[in-house]
Amino acid sequence: MTESVDLGDFRHGATDSSADPQADFSTNVHPLGPCPGTVAALARADRRRYPDPAYRELKERLAAHHGAAPERIVVGAGASELVARLVATVPGAVLVREPTFVEYRKAAWAFDRPVLRASSDEEFLALLARASIAFLCHPNNPDGTLHSPEFLARAATLAGRSGCRLVLDLAYAPMVRAKPDLPDGAQQLWAPNKSMDCAGVRAGYLVASDADFAAALDKRAASWILSAEGVELLREFVEPSTTAWLESTRPEIERLLAELGTLLRRRGWQVRTGTANFLVAMPPPPWNAAAIANELRERGIRLRDAANMGLPGWLRLAARPDRERRLLEQALDSIDRP
C-alpha cells in the first residue's frame, strides 16, 4: 500500500484561483519571457483539426535532435502526465532522492505504489535494487543542484542490473549553462514549457531507453494526448534558433539569480544556490517559511514553500526580472516583524 497522505501534501503551493500576483517567484519559468519563436509557433497551431494520433513527424524531429530512433520517443501532456504514465506502466516501488519534485510521490499515491525515500546519494544507490522505477530531477527541484556524473553513471549501471527504470527529469536543464550528463540506459524526461515560458501549454516528451518500453507507455496514453499547441511548442523547442536563444540567455539568468540571492542574504536569510534558475532560502527568525510566504502573498508576491518537497523551513524562489525583484525588496522592507 502507498503511504497515508493528505492531498494537501502534493499541492504545488503557487497557482490557484486567486488574482494574478504582481511578482511570481513560485513558478520556475524563464525570467526573460517566451523565446522569439514561441508566439509564432503557437499561432501556427491548427485548432480545427486533430493532430496525427501517432505524432510521427514530431517524433522524428525530436528523435533527430537527440540522436535517437523515433520509436523511442513518447509524447505527453507535460512532465506530470508523463510521470504518472511511467508509474502506471511499471508496477512496484517508486524510489525518489529527496528533497525533490512532489509529482513523483503523487503518482505513486495515485497508483497505489510504495515509495522509497533516499536522503543521500549512497542511500539512493543502495535502494535501487528494491525499486521498479526511480526518479532523479537533474538539475534538482527545489534546490537546483546537478547530480555528479559519477553518481548518475553508477545509478544507471545499478538500475540496469536490477531492472529498475531510472528516469532523469530534465525540465530545467535548458536553462543551465553546463550541459547535463545523461548516462546510457536512463529515460530522459523533457518538459520545455518552463524554459520557453509557456507553463500553460502542457507538453513534454520522453526519450525512452528502448522502443519496447516506449511502446508500452504509448499504449497507456489517451487518444491525442498532445494538443495542436503542444505539438508546435515541442517542434519549436528543438529548432536551432530556439536552442541558440536559450544558450544566449543563461548569463542573464545567472545575473538575476545572483542579485536575488544577494537581496535575501543582506536581510539575514540563509540562501542555497545551485545551477538552475531558482534557489532555496530560509528566512531569519522569528519568521518561518509559511508565515512570510503568506504575508508576501497578501502583498501580491508569491513564493514556493518547499516543505512538501522535503525541505521544511525553506522557500524556493525563481530568478525573475529586475522589476519583480524590486517589488520583493520593497515588500520585505515594509514587513513588520511578527
Image (spheres, rainbow, N blue to C red):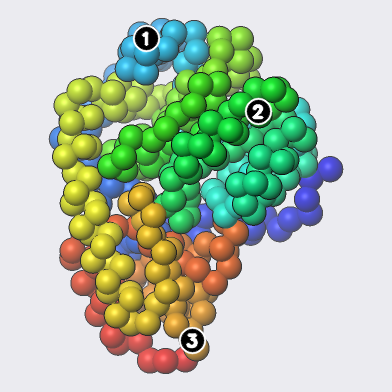
Give the crowd class for mark 2: few <14, some 14-19, many >=20 residues within 10 Å.
Answer: many
Q: In the rendered view, tell whether residue 271 sits above or below residue 32.
A: below
Query: Which numbered tag is attached to residue 27?
Result: none
Q: Earlier in the sequence, mark 1 or mark 3?
A: 1
Left or right: 6 in relation to 319: right
Instruction: Tell me the residue at 49%/26% (across/down).
Output: 183
Give the crowd class for mark 3: few <14, some 14-19, many >=20 residues within 10 Å.
Answer: few
Q: Which dot, 2 or 1, sits closer to the camera? A: 2
For this orientation, the residue located farthest to the right is 1
List x then y, in percent, for residue 182.
45, 29
Q: Which dot, 1 or 3, sits closer to the camera? A: 3
Quarter of the image where one finds residue 139: top left
For the residue marked with disc 2, what is the amino acid? Ala
Quarter of the image where one finds residue 8: bottom right
For label 1, the residue is 60
User: Could you say whether the residue bearing mark 2 is in a helix, strand or loop?
Assistant: helix
Query: Which numbered tag is attached to residue 285?
Result: 3
For label 2, the residue is 159
For the residue marked with disc 1, what is the amino acid? Glu
List x then y, in percent, for residue 188.
48, 27
Instruction: Tell me the residue at 42%/38% (across/down).
Output: 171
User: Could you say whether the residue bearing mark 3 is in a helix, strand or loop?
Assistant: loop
Left or right: 261 in relation to 202: left
